[in-house]
């Protein structure tokens, strides 16, 4: 009896699986992006999704797809990274079922995740170290086609996005080395001679075949020498020279920037002072303010009487012959006073009281 029940349930499940729907979407789609109209593709009504309490069942712990029962569509719940989800497995797909109740129905759904070129190539060899310098040795007796080294790189993307190509970007002597386009092998293209420099630096670019393509750069140091001590003596100062040149360039640029800033600041200050002084002179020149008379302290008008109380005017004369006499003829200005007549308007009386020193009987001077 128990066996018959199990067989019946199995047959019922087979009958409830009506169809299967597949979708294909690119990786890294944003949250909430549309995957497909599941109600239309399954031939169901949106009301059936609501009444049947449609839901997604998946065995994975993380659910990347969600069902919108109000609209009958599938949307992205979590951003999908194909490399993190499937690594190098191809094809990469999500498998789940949409279940309905009353009656029970199951609809298998497959969502394939296509690869996007979102990862640049990674160089595995030569190892790029910051402190030490690794150099490949090439003997001076090396012939044409001598294998110097091989650049090894990988791309975690899949398909044609992971196809890599190698190109020689820069070299100390481009006529000495070449790089294999597909395998990354660095070989000599001519006979090595004694005239070739010991230090050789090559810059190789690794590009993938995606659209748009991504690339990585690797520097390869090559030593053309027959003995290790020769290589050691030549390459010990390699890193030091580079750091010294970088620091020198930085300080030179910084000093130039500071000097330029100070020069511009001084120039602006000088121009501002000149403009300020010019504007001040123009303001004083065009001023319409009334002129206030100035009276010296000893000549100020007092009590509004029109009298100058302290006036000292002198007239001084000398003889033509100073050896005979140094006497002076003077008239005290204090005896000449301007008096304003209060009873008259605009009239002035001058009282002159002069007394010449020549009229004095005791004067020792002679007339001239």
Image (spheres, rainbow, N blue to C red):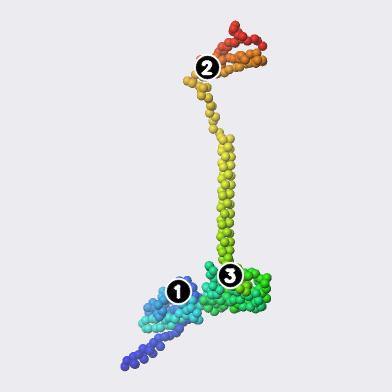
Which of the two residues, 187 or 77, is positioned nearer the viewer here?
Answer: 187
Q: Along the horizontal axis of the image, is 6 left or right of 287?
A: left
**Local crowd size for mark 3, using a 10 Å CA cut-off: few (<14), some (14–19), many (≥20):** few
Where's residue 353, x and y in %? Answer: 56, 11
Q: Which sits earlier in the primary sequence, circle 3 or circle 2?
A: 3
Element assignment for label 2: strand
Discs 1/3, front: 3
**Location of mark 3 (residue):** 232
Element assignment for label 3: helix
Element assignment for label 1: strand
Quarter of the figure with the N terminus: bottom left
The CA span between labels 1 and 2 is: 111 Å
**Location of mark 2 (residue):** 340
The CA span between labels 1 and 3 is: 58 Å
Which of the two residues, 77 or 80, is positioned nearer the viewer here?
Answer: 80
The CA span between labels 3 and 2 is: 114 Å
**Location of mark 1 (residue):** 76
**Rendered view: 57 above or below 341:** below
Q: Along the horizontal axis of the image, is 290 left or right of 43?
A: right
Q: Along the horizontal axis of the image, is 121 left or right of 72?
A: right
- Are the residues flagged by discs 1 and 2 in contact, CB closer than 8 Å? no
Where's residue 80, x and y in %? Answer: 46, 74
Where's residue 89, x and y in %? Answer: 49, 81
Q: What residue is rendered at 65% in x and 16% in y? A: 322
Q: Which sits earlier in the primary sequence, circle 1 or circle 3?
A: 1
């Amino acid at each position: 009896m128990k066996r018959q029940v199990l067989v019946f349930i199995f047959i019922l499940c087979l009958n409830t699986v009506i169809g299967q729907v597949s979708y294909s979407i690119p990786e890294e789609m944003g949250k909430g992006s549309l995957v497909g109209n599941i109600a239309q593709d399954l031939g169901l009504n949106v009301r059936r999704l609501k009444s049947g309490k449609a839901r997604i069942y998946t065995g994975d712990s993380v659910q990347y797809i969600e069902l919108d029962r109000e609209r009958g569509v599938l949307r992205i719940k979590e951003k999908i990274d194909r490399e993190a989800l499937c690594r190098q497995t191809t094809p990469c797909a999500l498998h789940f079922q949409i279940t309905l109740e009353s009656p029970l129905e199951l609809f298998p759904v497959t969502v394939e995740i296509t690869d996007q070129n979102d990862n640049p190539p990674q160089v595995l060899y030569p190892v790029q170290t910051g402190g030490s310098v690794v150099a490949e040795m090439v003997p001076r007796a090396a012939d044409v086609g001598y294998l110097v080294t091989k650049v090894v790189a990988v791309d975690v993307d899949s398909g044609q996005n992971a196809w890599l190509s190698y190109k020689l970007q820069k070299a100390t002597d481009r006529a000495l080395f070449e790089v294999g386009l597909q395998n990354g092998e660095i070989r000599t293209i001519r006979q090595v001679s004694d005239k070739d420099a010991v230090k050789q630096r090559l810059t190789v670019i690794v590009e993938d075949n995606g659209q748009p393509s991504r690339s990585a750069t690797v520097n390869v140091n090559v030593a053309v020498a027959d003995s290790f001590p020769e290589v050691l003596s030549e390459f010990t100062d390699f890193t030091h020279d580079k750091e010294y040149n970088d620091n020198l360039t930085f300080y030179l640029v910084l000093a130039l920037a500071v000097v330029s800033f100070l020069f511009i600041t001084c120039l602006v200050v000088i121009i501002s002072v000149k403009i300020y002084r010019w504007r001040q002179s123009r303001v004083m020149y065009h001023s319409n303010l009334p002129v206030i008379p100035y009276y010296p302290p000893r000549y100020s008008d007092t009590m509004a009487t029109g009298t100058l109380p302290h006036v000292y005017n002198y007239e001084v004369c000398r003889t033509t012959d100073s050896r005979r006499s140094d006497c002076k003829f003077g008239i005290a200005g204090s005896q000449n006073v301007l008096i304003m007549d209060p009873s008259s308007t605009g009239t002035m009386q001058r009282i002159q009281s002069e007394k010449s020193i020549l009229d004095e009987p005791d004067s020792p001077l002679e007339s001239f």
